[in-house]
Amino acid sequence: DEATQIIRMVTRSRVDDETVAAIHEEVGGWALGTVLAGLALRDSDAPAGVAARGVASHRLFDDFFGAEIFGRLPLDIQAFLLDTCILELLDPDLCGHLTDRDDAIDVLRGLERDNVFTDWIGGYPPGFRYHAVFRTWLRARLDDVRPTRASELLRRAAAWTESRGRVADAIDFRLAAGDLAQAEALIVEYGPI
């Protein structure tokens, strides 16, 4: 398969199929991500260890996303990305709430149009998703620059989704924020969802 060929060519070694599969899944079929992963493996004394802990955490991914993608974006778009990276699915209305912007749908469409690792996934209202490796990188960046911000955003997302009757989402956000008592209270109040 193509991922195996790329990784073996870049690493100049025979990488086992399990490691290749783990990398392919993590980079989501992204060709350059596969090359960067191969380079990360080549730089490592323990290729399986790199794959097991996640190639997206390797400095090559940090350098690429930081310099080539994130660093070239306007500051307001950088802030938008960081404030929305806590979301697996990007609901434009929720993104607007988290970022205090009324143009979130336009920002998301622009990110998709400009190929900034953002995909439209359809539905109504329209939904979007960041590429998993990019989202992982954004989340690490958020945790580095504003360590308490993710919890604040998760709590805001929980309150917003609960106010709209999306209790299952609210529970997930409360759990992700570490608000176990509030999540339990929602479960008790609304029952199994």
Image (cartoon, rainbow, N blue to C red):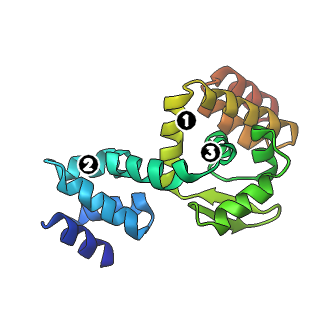
- Residue 117 at x, y percent in the picture: 56, 61
Q: Which residue is mark 2?
A: 50
Tell me the residue at 75%/40% (across/down): 99
Figure check: 130 above or below 78: below
Relative placement, left or right, of 161 versus 23 is: right
Residue 128, quarter of the rendered image: bottom right
Tell me the residue at 87%/42% (across/down): 164
- Front residue (pair 112, 161): 112
Give the amino acid at mark 1. Leu
Decide which of tag 3 and tag 2 comes sooner along the chain.
2
Q: Secondary structure at mark 3?
A: helix
Does residue 24 show up?
Answer: no
Measure how far apart labels 3 and 1 are at the Cα level: 10 Å
Q: Quadrant of the N terminus?
A: bottom left
Q: Which residue is mark 1?
A: 142
User: In the rendering, which numbered label is found on residue 78?
Assistant: 3
* Dot 1 crowding, Cα within 10 Å, few <14, some 14–19, many 20+: many
- Residue 100 at x, y percent in the picture: 81, 38
Name, please, the residue furthest toward the bottom.
Answer: 1
